[in-house]
Image: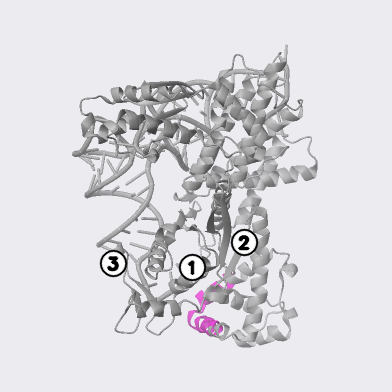
Amino acid sequence: MTKKAITEELREMIFAAVRKEFPEAEIKPEDILLEHPASEEHGDYATNIALKLKANSKWLLAQSPLEVAERLVNRIAEQKDSRIKKIETAGPGFINFKLSPEWQWEQVKEIILAEENYGKSPDKQKKIVIELVSPNINKPLHVGHLRNAALGMSLAALYQASGWKVVRDEINNDRGLHIMKAAYGYLLYGRKNPAKQNGWRDLLGAWVAQPGLWKTPVDEGLKPDYFVGNYYVLGEKFLNENIKFAGEQLAEMLQAWEAEDKEIRRLWKVLGDWVHEGIDQTYKRLGVRHEKRWYESLLYQEGKKVILEGLENGVFEKLPDGAIRANLEKYGLPNKILIRSDGTAIYMTFDIALTKHKVEEYIADKYVWVVGSDQIDHFKRLFVIFEMLGLGKRENFFHLAYGMVRVPGGKMSSRLGNVVLADDLLDKVKEMTIKLMAERKIGGELSEEEKEKAAEAVSIGAVKYTILKVDPLLNLVFDLEKSISLEGDSGPYLQYAYTRAKSVLRKSQIPNTNSQIPRGDISNEEQSILRYLYRYPEVVEVAAKNYNPSIICNYLFSLAQRFNSFYNNQPILNPGNESLSDRRLQLTEATAIILKSGLNMLGIEAMEKM
RNA sequence: GCCUCCGUAGCUUAACGGAUAAAGCUCUGGUCUUCGGAACCAGUGAUAGAGGUUCGAUUCCUCUCGGAGGCACCA
């Protein structure tokens, strides 16, 4: 797709018309808003430029917006363009464009020729680094991570399609008290034959001498991250019941870990490997990939140097007790301590170091962090401090904040035991799917293996779509029965529309894309698909620019609705006329291509059979 | 106390300051001698409240009410 987008050309035509008719106007082509009118009788594109000009220009006092619009329409019409069938003014002063059906049919042919490349922009010579998921290495992923993964991977796909080079990265939170809790829990409760002692050093010594005395994920038949997660919960519980004793034990453990004590590091490694193994299985299921993994354990001590340099350069201030602080008042943000009075670093210090590594290793045009909305202020301050240090520009950093995921009871917490784990949710939805398939006798001609694959793809599609179709910032309540839909505005609805289209195409001759597309009376159903297909590239572009996959969801659902309506009311294979069948098959094929491509943007599989 | 985000139909959501506020679920009724019924068609039903800016406000501003998150020398 090296050709200019139709929107860009329309914008230029309108801009030229404004320059000619109203030389005094101070506008740029980007100021011209083009939209698809909600009502089809208002054409394919509309602009409110006449209303805007009228509102912003004193010298237009004597004219009504409609008169302004009419003068512009005449100017636009002078630039004869065969792609536009009709330009007219309407309502208070809109200018509506109706595209020619010939041009729209040409787009159908282009879609079929380009196949999966349709909607993809040429290389923009730009790079984006997207941080996503970033798990704690002491327990399995929960539904919050699921939202993170779905958003992050979709964003990556959207930017890739928009011509950007994409680097996905994650930070593994693999050190700290939460990790020690899992380790302590394992030492205390993971033993095959319970021991009497509960001092961490004795237990650890026994484990090092004979690790075989302790259970493994294989012994328990558990996914390894679930296995470790259980001990984390037990460790936390023990801590709550023995605050003083266990608190001291954990503090000692952490100190030993930081002192690189060989024994504790060995246990840490074993447990960490198990969690990674389990999380990687979930990643695979969800299609999550990273090009770069950072480890907090390797970088956590860095950052102090940068802060001290900042202090020397007068960027930060030293408090009477010795703590170092960033004064953020002029940015309208609360001040932030960066180094404690005892000289130790805090999380922000580490995050600055990590970000420095990131921008040094990956020189990019944009850096995005997919992290929950509870961290909004953290990132605001991180970006400002980073800029204060002269390490980067704020406008190149973006925190894609997503709302909290909660369960009907309220906020999820391991303490309340109401955490919904990612794999558990997917498994439950899969059960629902399998039940539905059996009840409705769907997929009768599929083998057991194919049915299983379809159920997995459908349940993942259902969950991802549920997450992605709403604005990222909104909080999400996950109620299994209510939230996850397999019908209507849902992932499976889109997958099904694709499968049906492919099924029809399989039963036909392959449409001859080189032939002239037969014209004649075009039904309303065909028309409504036709005037939707060519919009796909601009939808991808807009969704990427706004960091918002829900724009893709809305578009695809609308397209699938139109296709289903067409499918139900118009015979495709046997309309009683061969050339009519050809035309409808081409429309079907173009729709299938776009549905598949769009589903890919959402990380949802489109299947030939389901 | 201070800051940020969110309040649209019974429920879950759409609508870049614009044209008749759009869907899905639910409920009610209908569609199949055809290409896959996870489908299609129809009906009921909404901008939290009060002001303001604007030719025009779900959208912007102010206040009130309701919900969520943040504001540590926590991570």
Q: Which residues are magenta?
A: A233-254
Spatial separation of the CA atoms under disc 2 and disc 1: 16 Å
Residue A235 on the magenta span:
yes
Is A197 left or right of A542, judged from the image as shown?
Answer: right
Q: Are marks 2 and 1 on the same chain?
A: yes
State which chain disc 2 sits on: A
Q: Is residue A364 above or below residue A42?
A: below
Q: Nearer the viewer, residue A364 or A452?
A: A364
Disc 2 crowd rating (10 Å Cα; few below 14, some 14-19, many 20+) is: few
Indicate the secondary structure of the residue bearing disc 2. loop
What is the quadrant of residue A462 in the picture?
Answer: top right
The N terminus of chain A sits in image quarter: top right
Viewer-nearest of discs 3 and 1: 1
Q: Which mark is residue A329?
A: 3
Q: Residue at x 47, y 36 (%)?
A: A8
The residue to which callout 1 is attached is A355
Residue B9 in percent (x, y) is at 41, 34
Q: CA distance from mark 3 to mark 1?
A: 23 Å
| Chain that bears disc 3 | A
Label 2, on which residue?
A: A291
User: Which residue shows up at 52% across the image and 45% down it?
Assistant: A549
Is A465 left, or right, of A324 in this rendering? right
Along the horizontal axis of the image, is B19 left or right of A364? left
Q: Which mark is residue A295?
A: none
- Chain where mark 1 sits: A
Query: Separation of disc 2 and disc 3 at Cα?
Result: 37 Å
